[in-house]
Image (cartoon, rainbow, N blue to C red):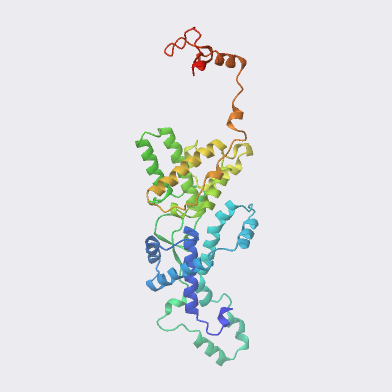
């Protein structure tokens, strides 16, 4: 419809929508409060964005955040999730949001193709009704301008890699699903779960507070949490962590097969492959126990505190408390009632029967400590 509006400028409209496409890519990778940092700028420059387009992109990101344009429609998200057959929960919304934003970005990055190339050949459609003179005029009108031969062919969209910490660009056509069977290796940045987790482990081992077994348990959950954030939430930095990510991870642990971690291959599997493996298991073999989840949550809490102490800006509202499994009964209700013999032995102690002296409490002379007190 924009093409028929008075004053329509395809060049300006293409630039605006392309900038929005890159912005949605950024929001999908770093969350709805994302800002452009130097790493992002470097990545976009490698993707071929010139300084003028970079300035427009920065302004677009701020505009979309301030007016709520970046926030996806809750109704549309719910529809997409339900159509996929998944249950509508906070966890599935958290997982679907970056994918939905990424899809919007991909569509907008193809704006140039939409404006410059029509899928329907109107010239061939109306050819029988046009005179030779009209066809000649039309051919002149649609002839590519001299010096702009590049417009005659679609320009492939080059994008920064969103799922890893690497800033090397890749084309949008180079997307594959090979990481479904095996997790994709990557180099950790200083503010990643992997990097901060290793700092914490080395610190605890160095201080003698953890043994090797505790360190292995911590490294296992840090590795799983890192994979989950990269593959499901499309983030790598702890500064991008949101409460919805924690909620989604808790839901994932509650469906993960109980024997996770016993096989060395588990650390090489992608999150999608782990979900498939969990789905194959009987219901009795799915879902980590409350005690195991609590141990993992304790490690994650220590991870977040270590990240903050390293100067990483982490959301202060993050809270793991509600994810912890609680006992149905009070601790005192779990303790057994003392037997008659135990009670009798207790009241035969010197404090009740008396003693010879303070330094001879087992003497038989009646000298009640209680009475003297």
Q: Compared to 234, does 348 lie above or below?
A: above
Residue closest to the far front: 372
Q: How many labels does the image show?
A: 0
Q: Which residue is drawn at 49% across and 11% down?
A: 367
Residue closest to the far bottom: 133
Viewer-closest of 114 and 331: 331
Where is residue 299? Give x, y as percent.
Answer: 46, 41
Q: Compared to 286, does 7 lie above or below?
A: below
Residue closest to the far top: 364
Residue closest to the far left: 206
**Residue 69 picture quarter:** bottom right
Viewer-closest of 131 and 153: 153
Q: Compared to 138, does 312 lie above or below?
A: above
**Residue 302 picture quarter:** top left
Q: Which residue is drawn at 52% across and 82% down?
A: 8
Viewer-closest of 226 and 113: 226
Q: Residue at x 62, y 15 (%)?
A: 340
Residue 108, visible in the rendered structure: yes
Residue 237, visible in the rendered structure: no
Q: Compared to 201, does 244 lie above or below?
A: below
**Side of 125 relative to 220 (left or right):** right
**Side of 312 relative to 274 (left or right):** left
Where is residue 208? Give x, y as percent.
Answer: 37, 33
Where is residue 184? Give x, y as percent.
Answer: 45, 50
Quarter of the image where the N terminus is located: bottom right
**Residue 338 picture quarter:** top right
């Amino acid at each position: 419809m924009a093409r028929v509006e008075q004053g329509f400028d395809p060049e300006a409209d293409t630039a605006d929508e392309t900038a929005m496409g890159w912005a949605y890519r950024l929001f999908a990778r770093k969350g709805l409060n994302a800002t452009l940092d130097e790493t992002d700028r470097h990545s976009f420059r490698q993707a071929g964005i010139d300084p003028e387009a970079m300035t427009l992109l920065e302004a677009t990101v701020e505009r979309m955040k301030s007016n709520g344009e970046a926030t996806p429609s809750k109704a549309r998200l719910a529809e997409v999730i339900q159509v996929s057959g998944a249950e509508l929960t906070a966890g599935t919304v958290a997982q679907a949001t970056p994918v939905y934003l990424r899809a919007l970005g991909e569509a907008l990055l193809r704006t140039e193709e939409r404006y410059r190339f029509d899928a329907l050949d109107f010239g061939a459609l109306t050819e029988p009704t046009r005179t030779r003179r009209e066809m000649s005029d039309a051919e002149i009108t649609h002839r590519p301008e001299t010096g702009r031969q590049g417009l005659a062919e679609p320009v492939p969209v080059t994008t920064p890699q969103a799922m890893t910490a690497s800033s090397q660009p890749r084309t949008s056509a180079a997307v594959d699903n090979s990481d479904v069977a095996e997790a994709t290796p990557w180099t950790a940045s200083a503010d990643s779960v992997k990097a901060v987790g290793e700092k914490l482990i080395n610190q605890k081992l160095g201080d003698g507070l953890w043994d090797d077994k505790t360190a292995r348990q911590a490294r296992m959950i840090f590795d799983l949490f890192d994979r989950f954030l990269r593959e499901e939430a499309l983030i790598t930095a702890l500064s991008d962590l949101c409460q919805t990510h924690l909620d989604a991870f808790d839901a994932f642990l509650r469906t993960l097969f109980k024997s996770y971690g016993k096989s060395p291959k588990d650390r090489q599997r992608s999150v999608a492959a782990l979900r498939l493996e969990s789905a194959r298991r009987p219901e009795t073999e799915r879902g980590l126990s409350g005690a195991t989840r609590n141990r993992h949550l304790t490690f994650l809490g220590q991870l977040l505190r270590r990240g903050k102490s390293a100067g990483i800006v982490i959301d202060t509202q993050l809270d793991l408390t509600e994810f912890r499994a609680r006992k149905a009964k009070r601790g005192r209700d779990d303790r057994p009632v003392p037997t008659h013999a135990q009670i009798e032995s207790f009241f035969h102690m010197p404090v009740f029967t008396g003693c010879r002296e303070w330094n001879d409490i087992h003497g038989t002379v009646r000298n009640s400590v209680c009475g003297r007190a």
